[in-house]
Amino acid sequence: MLPRFPKPRMSDLVLALLALLPILAVAIFLVILSMPASRAMPIGFGVCLLLALFVWRVAPLQVLAASTKGLIIAGELLYIIFGAIFLLNTLKYSSALETIRNSFRNLSSDRRVQVIIVAWLFGTFIEGSAGFGTPAAIAVPLLVGLGFPPLAAVISGMIVQSTPVSFGAVGTPILFGVSTGLAGAGSTAEFAAANGFASDRALLILVGSRVALLHAIAGTLIPLAMVCTMTRFFGERRSFREGIEIWPFAIFAAFSMTIPYTVVAIFLGPEFPSLLGGLIGLGIVTTAARAEFLTPPRDQTWDFGDKATWESEWLGKQTDASRQIHGETNNGVPKVGACAAWLPYLVVALILVITRQQSLPGIDEATFSPVKWIKSWQVNLEAMFGTTISHSVQPIYLPGTVFLIASGVAFLAHRMSWSRYRKAFSDSAKTILAASVALVFTVPMVQVFLNSGGGAEGYEKMPLALAIGVKQIAGEAWPLFATFIGGIGASIAGSNTISNMMLSLFQFNVAE
């Protein structure tokens, strides 16, 4: 009888390469082959499913539970996105968005000042309040309406997103992305307790404050870099110097956002840095611009050359229909005052600040705790399909609920007609349907990836297997490469939230 030899164990590097396959599959089909996300993400999910079932040999019920959890989380994300888009569409159809835009038109005739106020500050505020690509849909058309070449407007709008994006849609990339990514099969509270934190909230505030500090350091130079890019590639003289000339105002505008942004992250949490940082910065800088504080003298204002000299690639088509989509025309709709136009966003900020507090002034925490009360409205899904995978849904705590309340406030305060409110709802629903196909495969793929431990082969879960392989290759030099991971994840997933969800545990394991 032939002797029985033990089955050879797969090397750490080979296992890491296999764990990387779902991400590589999405990168190849989505980025290289330019396949739409609605087709590329199901392929990535299929690859992850096959690896979990036939390489890691995870129990089918565990894979089913992980996929189900992914679908539930995708539903929560879609709810947040719907709320954010619905609030924006409500403001668009009530003409409040037009009022907000018009408030920027007469601040300065210098294009460098305009782009800092609109792209950097207003763009940051919109990212913090709505996220999910809405700054491009709001701030960029505003720049075009002010007379910017469309390509210059798009590039400017994209550059500034490097700073506020980690706190988009009232902190969703951290509250959902990092939180869900670190939780794995259990909850973030369990992960936080196992790693010495008082609560999951304390863990996420620490993550958010460190993220804000790093972004603030780099972000202080972002407005100046944006202006220099604009003057170099879209100015008559193609000069960086014309952008550098405005450095006092650019640095002032940067600090006006990044200082409150960092302070808010430390003391209030990840919901507020971009939302309140952008709002506070807008108040400071627009007041300064009206007083001509640090702005260029009127005889030294900078502008683009004559429109006849603009290169054809700078231009795009903008029909009456597209202007209506972006809210630039609202024929027959009563004008909304500036205070009423901003009211819904102030409601969002106020509700979030109150409901994220452990206690209120003058009221003992044992008597009433806003955050504990609002989190008590939850549905617990324990041991799904008899596995260790669980999830808790807290519908009132979700930012989507806050957005819906603010939309209702806008409906009443702006005296909208039911027909226009229904139009805002239907447009938002169509947007969500378009986004849902990719999400319902992306998030389950991430959950199977995170919950692939405990299989019959005895391999570590995919993020940890990937981390072990990377550790062997990079060793202590990993911090030099770590910063690229988020960019790779976001370019593949198309979302900072999904990137954090997929790669937070991997980054934690490599660091550990």
Image (cartoon, grey):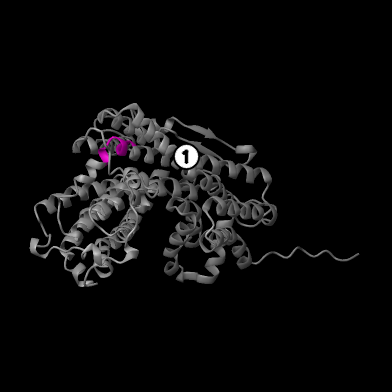
From the viewer's perspective, tell me whether residue 302 is left or right of residue 374: left
Which residues, given as a range, are shown in magenta?
90-97
From the viewer's perspective, tell me whether residue 128 is left or right of residue 489: left
Q: Is residue 273 visible?
A: no
Q: Position of residue 410 (x, y in %)?
A: 29, 32
Q: Relative to residue 23, is residue 13 depicted above or below?
A: below
Q: Residue furthest right?
A: 1
What secondary structure predominates along the stretch shown in magenta?
helix
Q: Secondary structure at mark 1?
A: helix
Q: Position of residue 205 (x, y in %)?
A: 36, 48
Q: Residue at (67%, 65%) from the top-left corner?
A: 10
Q: Amino acid at mark 1?
A: Glu
Magenta region includes residue 178: no
Name the image quarter holding the N terminus.
bottom right
Seen from the viewer's position, the closer of residues 42 and 308 is 308
Say which quarter of the image contains residue 91: top left
Q: Position of residue 37 (x, y in %)?
A: 52, 53
Q: Is residue 42 visible?
A: yes
From the viewer's perspective, tell me whether residue 351 is left or right of residue 200: left
**What residue is pinned by disc 1?**
76
